[in-house]
Image: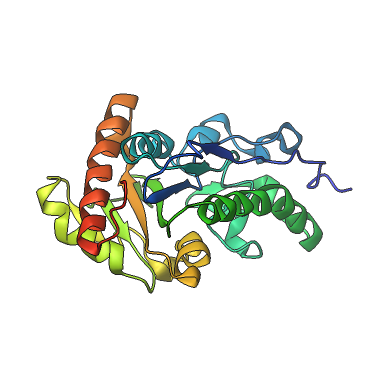
């Protein structure tokens, strides 16, 4: 086995409030910056492991606050997206990028097909199996909401948008949330910003939402707005209220 392919542990996803009876299932693909010891931090500097390159800071706290407000199950990944980005197709080149923004990822350089497949089996497969099982276990057709955060500057360029409401082909929930956003927040809210389907960020939405006829949306929050637990809770409660209002408009409020 090569230096790139240690015997990685199985990354069992975090599943919280599995018995929640709300209309929503929450997913947080980039909840953790954990890197297995056998990968030697992928050759990253300590600051890079803590940075947005390795995870979505604050996203898990927001998702947990939303889960509490909506009585929603939450499925979260337990490894860094640099080990395997669970919001990319398993075979996609950027599922294990050798560079992200200005940061090189030496531990992802030159991976063989077999090495990439091994990571997928350890990270991607159990995560998406848990999402599928959680969605399938609902008594009524569930709504899928994924929670992410983004950096205020990208390649040195400031981002004005504060909350992105993202969708792929199914725009139902995004449309309803955008129509209601002004009544719930003063933050600058935008459709498919700072990313959109053309950037490849809607994999989870397509796999578990669009392809199964489930209403779905991806939320992106600028991470300077959710830098501590109190801010994450405030944002989560606000977003939960926005989701609830949108679902009522769609006639899918249920117990949410």
Q: State the count of labels.
A: 0
Of residues 72 and 21, the one drawn nearer to the viewer in this rendering: 21
Of residues 126 and 102, the one drawn nearer to the viewer in this rendering: 126
User: Is residue 78 left or right of 213 when viewed as pictured?
Assistant: right
Residue 252: % across, % down: 30, 59
Residue 153: % across, % down: 33, 47
Q: Is residue 82 above or below residue 252?
A: above
Determine the image quadrant of residue 80: top right
Asked if one can make out residue 246 in the rendered structure from this viewpoint, the answer is: yes
Q: Residue at x 33, y 30 (%)?
A: 227
User: Is residue 29 left or right of 222 when viewed as pictured?
Assistant: right
Q: Is residue 76 above or below residue 135?
A: above
Determine the image quadrant of residue 20: top left
Residue 145: % across, % down: 39, 53
Q: Residue furthest bottom?
A: 169
User: Is residue 83 left or right of 219 when viewed as pictured?
Assistant: right
Residue 58: % across, % down: 39, 35
Asked if one can make out residue 111 in the rendered structure from this viewpoint, the answer is: no
Of residues 248 and 181, the one drawn nearer to the viewer in this rendering: 248
């Amino acid at each position: 086995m090569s230096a790139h392919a240690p015997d990685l542990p199985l990354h069992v996803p975090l599943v919280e409030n599995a018995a929640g009876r709300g209309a929503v299932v929450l997913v947080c693909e980039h909840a953790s910056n954990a890197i297995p010891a056998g990968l030697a931090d992928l050759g990253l500097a300590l600051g890079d492991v803590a940075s947005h390159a390795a995870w979505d800071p604050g996203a898990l706290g927001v998702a947990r606050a939303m889960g509490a407000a909506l009585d929603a199950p939450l499925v979260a990944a337990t490894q860094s997206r640099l080990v395997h980005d669970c919001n990319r197709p398993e075979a996609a080149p950027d599922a294990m990028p050798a560079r992200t923004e200005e940061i090189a990822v030496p531990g992802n350089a030159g991976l063989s097909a077999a090495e990439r497949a091994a990571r997928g089996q350890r990270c991607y497969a159990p995560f998406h199996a848990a999402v599928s099982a959680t969605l399938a276990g609902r008594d009524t057709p569930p709504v899928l909401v994924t929670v992410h955060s983004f950096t205020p500057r990208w390649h040195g360029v400031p981002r004005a948008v504060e909350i992105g409401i993202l969708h792929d082909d199914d725009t139902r929930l995004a449309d309803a949330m955008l129509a209601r956003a002004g009544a719930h927040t003063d933050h600058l809210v935008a459709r498919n910003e700072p990313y959109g389907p053309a950037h490849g960020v809607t994999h989870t939405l397509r796999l578990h939402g669009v392809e199964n006829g489930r209403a779905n949306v991806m939320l992106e929050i600028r991470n300077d707005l959710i830098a501590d637990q109190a801010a994450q809770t405030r944002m989560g409660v606000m977003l939960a209220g926005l989701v609830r209002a949108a679902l009522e408009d769609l006639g899918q409020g249920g117990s949410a």
